[in-house]
Image (tube, helix red, strand yellow):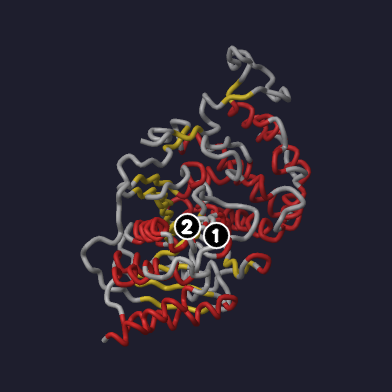
Amino acid sequence: MTAYEDARYVLPCSISFKCYDRFSILDDLEGLEDADGQVPFWHILTALLRSSVKAPDQLAELLDTVAVTLRGSSGPAGDYQLLRSVISDSQPAFFDTYWPLIIQLALELPQHFPSGSVQVLSTEGSPCTLQLSRRQAASLVVHQFLCTLRAPVWREDFFDFSIWYGSGQRHEEACRIYLTCVFAYLETFLSNPIQAQEDWDITCTLVTAEPDYMALGSSPVSLSPIEIVVVDSYQTSPEQLGLPSGAAVVSANSYIGFGQSATQEEVHIGSSPEACPAVLITPPLETNQVLIVKGAQAMLNITGTRRDIKAVAHEAEGPIDWRQRTMLFMDALELDIEGNEDGLPDLVPRNLAREVNKATIAFSSRPYDVVYSPLWGCGAFGGDPFVKVALLWCAASVAHLHLKIICDLGDKKAASSLHNFVTEAKRRLETAQDLFELLQSIPRKTARLKTIDSIIEQLASLASDL
């Protein structure tokens, strides 16, 4: 049993969510103060939300009052300069339309969560699922915007949107896009209020395998179809997200969530405000766990990577059925921090087993027609793309699904080598076990990115043995 079994995340509307009234917001504290002089925060918040807010500076002052009341400082929001700028660009729409909606959704929190808390996802009874109506999710999202939440016990930061508010951002354009996505999300409740009341649920599911889970057992599994797809740029477009009947891999950290730059995980969550509350109820992923988020709408199509991202509206011939959008949060090993005394970290037996098991747990979570994946665990995590793709192929085969590996033009050379590898492997190998054993036979001292040479050489040797 983990430390989070039976744990609940306490919300601001709970009578146990208390703080000091540092700014004397409340006129009468009689009957509210406890023995330590603290009062339920909900009374303070409802009083603050009754105040007149009609300009960016007034909003920044209100948010800072909340931050100092709860945490004693402005925290990462700092001077709120980027938030002021984004809101100024959207005036008068923000204060005429978005702000009243934010207040409404925020004050609905007790209605949507009568217990004042939500269940933290746990290993008990795996899979463990939290199901939220869109209105419930929206209420949590606006509290992340208002920064009225406290950090879950397993993390200290990156749980609300204050990280996007200040000046001096590492990637200002990314933070600006993520805030724009939040406002676009609010717009869906204004433009179609009936749909916003009646449509789909957002589900967060923690899937936990047995501690001794092994993806590749003694039974041979035929290799599944695989494609190497080269695109102009990575996108949060419906096709690359796996719609309508597939899923998309999110190259996650074990502490899943949004951030201030443009990693694939940050882009996928930042474009999808309904996925953001997952950080409140998902403890760090363990070796035998993955998180599945279904139904979160990507508000804009964010294209490109790192410093070259931009956001555009989705282009679709008809309505997009976001109910079917499935995000597979799979945390890869951080091989960039592992030493190479034992050779290439990718090829260490325990690492090979860990990664193929992780991917298989995700791919087997539902009967997907196809899974789209980037070069999972490469990039900042330092994984070898040829080893990683081979492991993903093994996992897809065990799960009996079609795998599509997405590479942008920056990965064109690797994609060409991957295409050659896939072509030869289809000719020479029959099962996922064959492929996994090929990986195990690569000399451990092989350098990163040179593994493809060894793979092709061994596949050629198989041909000569026939």
Closest to the observer, 18 or 453: 453
Instruction: Classify mark 2: helix, strand or loop.
Output: loop
Q: Quadrant of residue 349?
A: bottom left
Picture layout, residue 371 above or below residue 259: below
Q: Position of residue 44 (x, y in %)?
A: 64, 27
Picture layout, residue 61 above or below residue 374: above
Q: Position of residue 288 (x, y in %)?
A: 37, 50
Closest to the observer, 311 or 99: 311
Closest to the observer, 400 or 107: 400
Q: Quadrant of residue 411?
A: bottom right
Looking at this rendering, what residue extends furthest in the left direction? 219
Asked whether, in this view, residue 214 is left or right of residue 324, the answer is left
Closest to the observer, 34 or 435: 435
Identify the residue shown where x is 63% and y is 15%: 37
Q: Position of residue 286 (x, y in %)?
A: 42, 47
Q: Which residue is mark 1?
A: 381
The reply to whether discs 2 and 1 touch (Cβ–Cβ < 8 Å) is yes
Residue 434 disc label: none
Q: Quadrant of residue 188?
A: bottom right
Q: Give the quadrant of the N terminus.
A: top left
Q: Residues within 10 Å of mark 2 (few under 14, many from 20)?
A: many
Identify the residue shown where x is 50% and y is 60%: 251
Picture layout, residue 389 above or below residue 331: below
Q: How many marks?
A: 2
Identify the residue shown where x is 56% and y is 54%: 337
Query: Does label 2 or label 1 sit earlier along the sequence?
Result: 2
Q: Give the quadrant of the C terminus.
A: bottom left
Q: Position of residue 312 (x, y in %)?
A: 62, 69
Q: Mark 1: which amino acid? A: Phe
Asked whether, in this view, residue 307 is left or right of residue 212, the answer is right
